[in-house]
Image (tube, coloured by chain):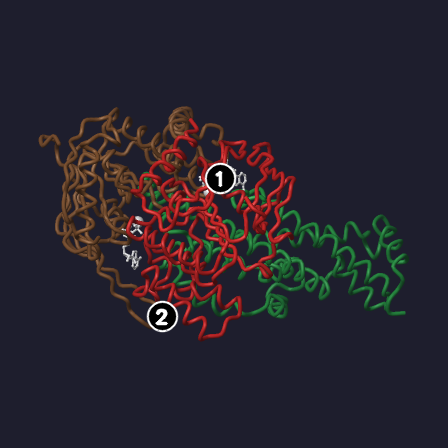
Amino acid sequence: MFFPNPIEVLTYFVHTLTHKIGKYNLTMHTLFSLKRVAVGFGLSSLSGIILGVAMGYSKTINAIVRPLFNIIRPIPGLAWIPLAILWFGIGETTKYFIIFMGGFANIVLNSYDGTVKVNPVLEGAARLLGANDVQVFFHVILPSATTYIFAGLQVSLSTSWMAVLAAEMISSYEGAGWIINMGMQTGDTTLILVGMVAIAIVGFLLANIMRILERGLCSWTIRGR
Amino acid sequence: MEDKKIKVEVRNLTKSFGNLLVLDNVSFEVFDGEFLCIVGPTGCGKTTFLNSLTKLYDIDSGSITVDGEEINPRKHNLAYIFQEYSTMEWLKVQENIEYGLKIKKFSPEAIKQRTDIVIQMVGLDKYRNYYPSQLSASMLQRVVIARAFAIQPDLLLMDEPYGQLDLTLKYKLEDELIKMWERQRTTVLFITHNIEEAVYLSDRIIVLTNKPTKIKTEIINNLPRPRKVSDLEFVKLRNQVTDLIKWW
Amino acid sequence: MDNQGKIKIQCGHLHKTFHAKNRKQDEVNEVIRDFNLQVRENEFVVLFGPGQCGKTTILNILAGLEEKNSGTVVVNDIEVTGPRQDRGMVYQTTALFPWLKVIDNVAFGPKMQGMKHSDWKKKAQYYIDLVGLTGFEKTYPVKLSGGMQQRVGIARAYCNDPEVIFMDEPFGHLDAQTRYLMEEEIEKICNGEKRTVVFVTNNIEEAIYLADRIVLLTNTPTHVDKEYVVDIPRPRDYTSPGFLALREEITARIDTTNL
Ligand SMILES: Nc1ncnc2c1ncn2[C@@H]1O[C@H](COP(=O)(O)OP(=O)(O)OP(=O)(O)O)[C@@H](O)[C@H]1O
Ligand SMILES: Nc1ncnc2c1ncn2[C@@H]1O[C@H](COP(=O)(O)OP(=O)(O)OP(=O)(O)O)[C@@H](O)[C@H]1O
Ligand SMILES: [Mg+2]
Ligand SMILES: [Mg+2]
């Protein structure tokens, strides 16, 4: 049977929320995946925003980093898996690294875009009102880049979530990816679908949390109807 | 009025933002081929009305219809000149003007011919290849006016289109607008702060109150055309309107 | 006006040509050719010129927001090389910070200079009340009408206490009534606190109502065509004979030179 009936999947899903598959129950597996995304994505957001904004703000930094970045940029995050395993073994570091690389380029590019596209008239207005370089940076450049940065974060979050599955399918004893992999190896389609449902729910929740955060931070762009 | 065909019908329109009531149960109609001016204090809801008409804003209650049905940009041939500069930054002056025509799928010859006419009319011939960021404020405004005129709409919505222009150009473009209107019997809804302009252009003037906005009064303006600002009748009407809208 | 006043703005032999690099062509646009202007302390000077002649460009150069090709610009005894807070600007395109609420926009200058919270708050509130936006302190600019945004721009410039203030068609989007009220307010502020103002407008009545001196500009490449000293006593009446006569005179000049 390649496609088990939905009721069966659902009951199994509810069951595994509290009952073990392998070492942990489904809730714990999902939390493992979430933790990995949190670390990998957190690191890539933080460093990506800093690097992107720095590149946009300073032509020198851009000139130095840009060539290197242009080489890395077109490589999809998953292509790093073999290298990562050679470098870091098959522990957690590898997974963090793969997730990190999955979202990094996009965040850098968007932060860079947002920073260079700041309206020069507003920058001039701030300087006329007495703002110094640091103040212009924090009160004009950064706020006007936030919408761009958030667009980058949205996309990167979903690629990070993708990357964690790939990483877990390759080597791990826990996580949503592991569940799917397990189902595949044992020919248990119900288990595969349970893993997929968990992924879908968490992915959906993450995207929405992001949207709410963006609403809060960029409320000034909302005109309302 | 005699039984004229109604182009735009507004019934019991109410619109508020949060607990700021802006339009309060407003009803009026615009007849086919009419030139209607709307004047009112700043922040009273003129732009809000046009945005509701074009469905950019949702209304709380009431209805707005064009030709008896809900507005549909693909079906109704309309142009809207926004109050803020709505040029497209990434297009040159000429491309900005061609844009609307391209969307409406005109032939390349027709596009070229119409673009050439309007670009001359607004005096931007020399600046065809400039980007909006390289233009002055009045030039931006003229690009948008040209873009609207080029598509020769049935319904033309203009939100303070001539505010930034100098006198000479303003008079010229007022006359061009009148010419287009007389030639094509366009229905024009024209928002302005300038009473002289309203009296010069309109068939009818609607005067709005402060927020919450209602219609204070409407004035039929049947001075013979072409009008002259120095005519006695003109000055009389102008003063009459001015007295009516002393809203402080 | 009073010739004793010290010179605040000294602008000599100013030239400006834009080179607009657009895809293939390189457009050269000479905008200002030999423009000279001297403004004394507390003087209210109106620049009156045809559309696109270069008024905004002149103000930008005086404020230090735009580079000049040649000529000297000295404001407040300092050669202008970049923007400084002793000069304020009310923009034709409003140029508000969209991510700041009305009150934070108005208080931007004082805040940057480290004024105390309670002080900037009081000061900003004063100017918000002055331009009639009480109740909209906590609103973002996208939710304001065109005219309201323009008034925020005016309040923001004044709240920073500049010694010299440049105003680029600040009343373009206001209705006649608000315009008159605001003109009166500006008059009051300028007489009460005495500031040097350079004001751009295309409205002849507004020019005569406000100005100590009107500087008539030519078409591009622009320079000074003629200057009119306005010594009608204040407050001025739009229909007084002196007012109407000057209006006639300037209009006639514009017609004959075909500006
Ligand atoms: N998107 C919005 N959200 C909240 N309030 C809004 C929004 N748009 C407009 N308003 C409010 O509605 C009122 C009317 O605004 P509107 O732009 O329609 O005025 P207007 O008559 O066009 O004025 P003006 O002549 O200054 O352009 C204003 O008080 C404004 O603050
Ligand atoms: N960044 C730029 N690059 C190229 N040309 C420019 C640039 N900025 C302005 N110009 C040109 O300079 C001329 C004068 O512009 P400016 O904005 O100073 O006019 P203005 O007198 O303020 O006009 P308006 O009455 O329309 O506001 C215009 O022809 C414009 O195309
Ligand atoms: Mg409006
Ligand atoms: Mg200008």
How busy is the neighbourhood of tag 1: few (under 14 within 10 Å), some, or many (20 plus)?
Answer: some
Distance, label 2 to label 1, CA atoms, is: 47 Å
**Is B241 left or right of C169, judged from the image as shown?**
right
Q: Which chain is green?
A: A
Does any atom of ligand 1 lie closer than 8 Å to the CB of label 1?
A: no
**Is C7 left or right of B10, judged from the image as shown?**
left
**Nearer the camera: disc 2 or disc 1:** 1
Mark 2: amino acid: Arg
Residue B126's place in the image compared with A114, above or below, is: below
Residue C220's place in the image compared with C101, above or below, is: below
Viewer-side residue, A40 vs B155: B155
Viewer-side residue, C243 vs B44: C243
Q: Which chain is red?
A: B
Label 1 resides on the chain identified as: B
Q: Point out which mark residue B206 bears.
A: 1
Q: Point out which mark residue C221 bears.
A: none
Tell how many labels: 2
**Is C246 left or right of C89, judged from the image as shown?**
left
Is residue A35 among the parts visible in the rendering?
yes
For the N terminus of chain A, the image quarter is bottom right
* Figure colour of chain C: brown
The residue positioned 57% from the left and 44% from the top of the image is B29
Q: For mark 2, what is the residue?
A: C23
Mark 1: amino acid: Ile
Q: Position of residue C178 (x, y in %)?
A: 38, 33
Q: Position of residue C157 (x, y in %)?
A: 33, 36
